[in-house]
């Protein structure tokens, strides 16, 4: 089990570093869904690794980081649902005499 947790933690660290490098180099937008997914995934896996190894300050940091990720991703989903609803609404008919 320890090897599996180490692999998860290492993958999370690589994902977070990749996301940071992509945003810092201008190859990815920090406002985009891909960055937010990478950020959430990396933080969640590092949280698991840190908790397993009883590194509580790091585990708590990554718990909060993951929570921010969930909040941000939920905003993306809500905005997308609102946009789809508005796109499905029929356009208002023009007023008579215009």
Image (cartoon, grey):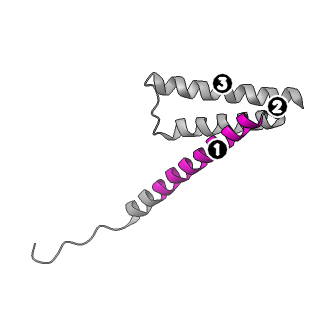
Nearest-to-viewer mark from 1 and 2: 1
Q: CA distance from mark 1 to mark 2?
A: 20 Å
| Residue extent of the magenta highlight | 56-81
Secondary element at image label 2 = helix
The answer to whether 20 appears left or right of 42 in the picture is left
Residue drawn at point x = 65 percent, y = 34 percent: 42
The answer to whether 57 appears left or right of 27 in the picture is right
Q: CA distance from mark 3 to mark 1?
A: 19 Å
Residue 29, numbered label:
none
Magenta stretch: includes residue 67: yes
User: Against 81, is 17 above or below?
Assistant: above
Q: Earlier in the sequence, mark 1 or mark 2?
A: 2
User: Against 53, is 81 above or below?
Assistant: below
Secondary element at image label 3 = helix
Q: Earlier in the sequence, mark 2 or mark 3?
A: 2
Q: Which residue is mark 3?
A: 14
Q: Earlier in the sequence, mark 3 or mark 1?
A: 3
Q: Which residue is mark 1?
A: 64
Residue 34 percent location from the top left of the image: 53, 37
Residue drawn at point x = 47 percent, y = 24 percent: 24
The answer to which quarter of the image holds residue 43 is: top right
Residue drawn at point x = 63 percent, y = 47 percent: 67
Residue 80 percent location from the top left of the image: 47, 54
Q: Are marks 3 and 1 in contact (CB under 8 Å)?
A: no
Pick out the residue farthest to the front: 57
Q: Which residue is mark 2?
A: 5
Q: CA distance from mark 2 to mark 3?
A: 14 Å
Pointer 3: residues within 10 angstroms few (<14), some, or many (20+)?
A: some
Pointer 1: residues within 10 angstroms few (<14), some, or many (20+)?
A: some
Q: Are marks 2 and 3 in contact (CB under 8 Å)?
A: no
């Amino acid at each position: 089990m320890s090897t599996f947790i180490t692999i998860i933690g290492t993958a999370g660290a690589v994902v977070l570093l990749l996301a940071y490098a992509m945003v810092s180099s201008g190859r990815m937008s920090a406002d985009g869904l891909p960055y937010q997914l990478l950020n959430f995934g990396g933080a969640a896996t590092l949280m698991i690794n840190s908790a397993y190894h009883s590194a509580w300050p790091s585990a708590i940091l990554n718990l909060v980081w993951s929570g921010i990720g969930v909040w941000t991703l939920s905003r993306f989903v809500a905005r997308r649902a609102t946009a789809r609803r508005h796109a499905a609404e029929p356009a208002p008919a023009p007023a008579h005499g215009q």
